[in-house]
Amino acid sequence: MASETLIRFGILGCAEIARKFSRAITMVPTATLYAVGSRSLEKAKAFASANNFPPNAKVYGSYEEVLEDPDVDAVYVPLPTSLHKKWAVLAAQKKKHILLEKPVGLNVAEFDAILEACESNGVQIMDGTMWVHHPRTAAMKEFISDADRFGQLKSVHTIFSFAGDDDFLKNDIRVKPDLDGLGALGDAGWYCTRGILWAANYELPKTVTALPGAVLNEAGVILSCGSSLQWADGKVATFQCSFLSHLTMDITAIGTKGTLHLNDFIIPFQAKEAHFSLASKSGFNELVTGWEPTPSKQIVMTDLPQEAQMVREFSRLVGEIKKGSKPETKWPTISRKTQLVLDAVKVSIKNGFQPVEL
C-alpha cells in the first residue's frame, strides 16, 4: 500500500450525496478529503466539520478556488445536472481528474464537450454509479457470461422507483427543469439503463421506445416513465423508473439456460454482505409441483461498501496516470452509452412514444 499514490480530493458543492462520498473517501487509504468549496463559505465550513474532513483541509467559498488549488488531484462533482458541463469542463482544463455524478449531462452533446476537455487535458473521468464497483457485480457478471450455466442473453428487465413526498415533488432539484431537467429518467432511469447495458456487455440497442403512460409535472419534468429496448439479434429489455412508486430496485436477466434475479442492485440491503439469486437449467419436477433444481442464493462479502470501492478504483486510475499511464477509456465510454439511451427515451416520449434508432 505504501507504494500507492495518495489522491487528494476536492468536492464542489455540499449536496446530500456528497456526505456519502465524503464518508467513502475516509475509508480508502489511497484517498483523502483535501478541500471542499461552496458558494457560501459558512456552508463549506459546516460541511467539512460535519463530514470528518481533516483539520488541515482547505475550505473555500467558491468552486473556482477548489479548481485553482494546485494540490487538488481530483474533484467530485455532485452539482445539479445543468451545471455539469460548465464545471466539469473547467475542472478538466485545470487538470483535475473528475468523478461526476449521474446523469453526466442533460444530453450526450453536453457530455461530449466534457469528454473533449478531458481528452485534451489527459484527465480521468468516471461517473458516480456505485453499484458497478461492488464485488457482487463481478460475481453476477461471471454467471451471466457463462455459456454453460446462463447461455445467451435474451432479455433484461430493471426497475428503480421510490415514492417522493409532497416536499420532494415540489422542491427537490430533480423535479426542477432548470436544475435536473431529466427528472426520474435521469436519476432513477440512469441506473435502470446502466443495468441493462451492463447485462448486454454495453452493446447499444438498435431501437429505444418509450412506453405509454409517462407522467410529467407541470414544468414538463418526467416523474415516471418506462421504455423498451430492442437489439438486432433479438434481445429485448424494459425498464421502469419513477418518483411515484414504492422503493424498488430490481434487475432480472434471462438467458437461454439461466436466470439472474436481484432485488437491491443499486444499493444493497446491507453494506458488507450482498446476495443475488441464480437459476440454471431449471425445469418442473415430474408432477409439475415444483422446480428442479431450485434457484440458489449467492452471498458475496466485501470489506468496503460499494461507494468506497468506487473511490478506491478511481484513485487507483488517477495514481496510475500520475505515474505516466493514459486515462482509462472504459468508464467514459460506458457513461456516454448510458446517456445516449436516456436521450433516446426522452425523444421517444416527446414524439408520442415512437421508436428512436440509435
Image (cartoon, helix red, strand yellow):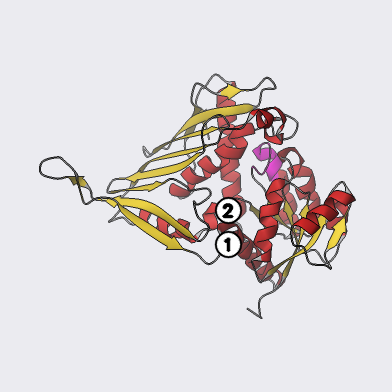
Residue range of the region highlighted in magenta in the rendering: 103-112
Where is residue 142 drawn, in percent x and y?
Answer: 39, 59
Does residue 317 sit above or below 45 in this rendering?
Answer: below
Residue 351 visible to the viewer: yes
Residue type of the residue flagged with mark 2: Met
Which of the labelled discs sits on residue 299, or is there none?
none
Which of 262/19 is in front? 19
Where is residue 36 drawn, in percent x and y?
Answer: 81, 56
Q: Give the residue furthest to the bottom.
A: 2
Where is residue 212 drawn, in percent x and y?
Answer: 49, 21
Residue 340 visible to the viewer: no
Q: Give the residue furthest to the left.
A: 286
Residue drawn at (75%, 49%), measured in percent from left and top? 88
**Residues marked 2 and 1 touching at CB (< 8 Å):** yes
Residue type of the residue flagged with mark 1: Gln
Query: To which residue does mark 2 refer?
Result: 130
Residue drawn at (65%, 22%), measured in percent from left and top? 217
In the picture, measured across the screen, residue 153 lies left or right of residue 42, that is: left
Query: To which residue does mark 1 refer?
Result: 309
Q: Dot 1, how many residues are within 10 Å of its Cα: few (below 14), some (14-19), or many (20+)? A: many
In the picture, measured across the screen, residue 74 lies left or right of residue 333, that is: right
Asked if residue 143 lies in the magenta stretch, the reply is: no
Residue drawn at (34%, 55%), measured in percent from left and top? 297
